[in-house]
Image: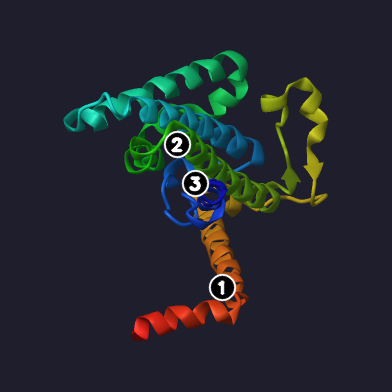
């Protein structure tokens, strides 16, 4: 049982990361990841949507006819996103204005409807919840990493405008990584997002290849012998 949960977590955070591997949800990923705070805000909103929609879909899966399951799943996701949008409008209005249309567009995120259809509709609620949490945190990791890269290269800062998410006390959190830096506009613009995402995907592939090379040789032998038989 523990190994099943461990596999779900590893898949969501790294092995099947929806941004770096599946390449899903790229529109909001590329659009709002110009700072760490923007990326973190959208990432947490997406994570909450995945957790709540996956859990609800799993709980109602035995009561929904197959013929109308997709429209029902979309209604569930849209309801969850509406609640999150209203909550952000009430408590994080500054960040809500910056993220703009990309909050309601979470409904159309392919990774969310994909996990509801491919996983949550076939699994118990605890596994569906863990899958949503892992996939959401993996997506948040991609947003924050890309946001950090773009903010440092584009503006020379880190955690700028942190007060939009963490309140007035966070105004002093901004770190000037590069002092007296005039910035690089390309990193802030959409082309910089494509270049940054490409570099991060290449880095992940290099890390995965290194990990594969370090696996013990005795694991490969039985597989090869089985193929020869």
Which sits earlier in the primary sequence, circle 1 or circle 3?
3
Distance, label 1 to label 3, CA atoms, is 29 Å
Q: Which residue is more in the foreground, 87 or 56? A: 56
Q: Around disc 1, counting alpha carbons within 10 Å, would you say few (fewer than 14), some (14 to 19), or many (20 or more)?
A: few
What secondary structure is marked by label 3? helix
Tell me residue 138's x, y (percent): 55, 46
Looking at the image, residue 169 lies above or below residue 192:
above
Tell me the number on the disc at residue 91: none
Tell me residue 146's x, y (percent): 60, 50
Colouring style: rainbow
Marks 1 & 3, CB-CB < 8 Å contact: no
83 sits to left or right of 142: left
154 sits to left or right of 101: right
Which sits earlier in the primary sequence, circle 2 or circle 1?
2
Tell me residue 172's x, y (percent): 83, 31
Instruction: Name the residue that disc number 1 marks.
Output: 212
Q: Which residue is more in the foreground, 22 or 176? A: 22
Q: Around disc 3, counting alpha carbons within 10 Å, would you say few (fewer than 14), some (14 to 19), or many (20 or more)?
A: many
Looking at the image, residue 110 lies above or below residue 72:
below
69 sits to left or right of 29: left
Of badges 2 and 3, nearer the viewer stands 2
Looking at the image, residue 212 lies above or below residue 129:
below
Instruction: Name the residue that disc number 3 marks.
Output: 30
The residue drawn where x is 82% and y is 50% is 180
Distance, label 2 to label 1, CA atoms, is 28 Å
Which sits earlier in the primary sequence, circle 2 or circle 3?
3
What secondary structure is marked by label 2? helix
Instruction: Name the residue that disc number 2 marks.
Output: 128
Marks 2 & 1, CB-CB < 8 Å contact: no
How many numbered callouts? 3
Q: Which residue is more in the foreground, 187 or 110? A: 110
Tell me residue 65's x, y (percent): 20, 28
């Amino acid at each position: 049982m523990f190994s099943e949960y461990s596999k779900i977590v590893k898949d969501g955070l790294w092995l099947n990361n929806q941004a770096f591997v599946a390449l899903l949800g790229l529109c909001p990923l590329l659009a709002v990841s110009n700072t760490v705070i923007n990326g973190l805000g959208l990432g947490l909103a997406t994570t909450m949507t995945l957790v709540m929609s996956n859990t609800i879909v799993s709980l109602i899966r035995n009561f929904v006819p197959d013929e109308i399951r997709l429209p029902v799943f979309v209604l569930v996701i849209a309801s969850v996103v509406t609640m999150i949008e209203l909550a952000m409008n009430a408590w994080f209005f500054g960040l809500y204005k910056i993220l703009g249309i990309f909050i309601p567009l979470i409904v159309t995120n392919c990774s969310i409807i994909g996990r509801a259809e491919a996983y949550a509709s076939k699994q118990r609620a605890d596994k569906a919840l863990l899958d949503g949490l892992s996939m959401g945190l993996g997506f948040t990791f991609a947003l924050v990493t890309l946001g950090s890269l773009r903010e440092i290269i584009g503006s020379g800062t880190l955690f700028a405008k942190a007060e939009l998410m963490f309140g007035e006390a966070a105004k002093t959190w901004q770190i000037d990584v590069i002092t007296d830096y005039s910035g690089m506009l390309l990193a802030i613009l959409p082309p910089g997002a494509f270049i940054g995402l490409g570099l991060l995907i290449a880095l992940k592939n290099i890390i995965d290849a290194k990990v594969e090379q370090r696996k013990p040789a005795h694991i490969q032998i039985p597989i090869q012998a089985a193929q020869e038989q």
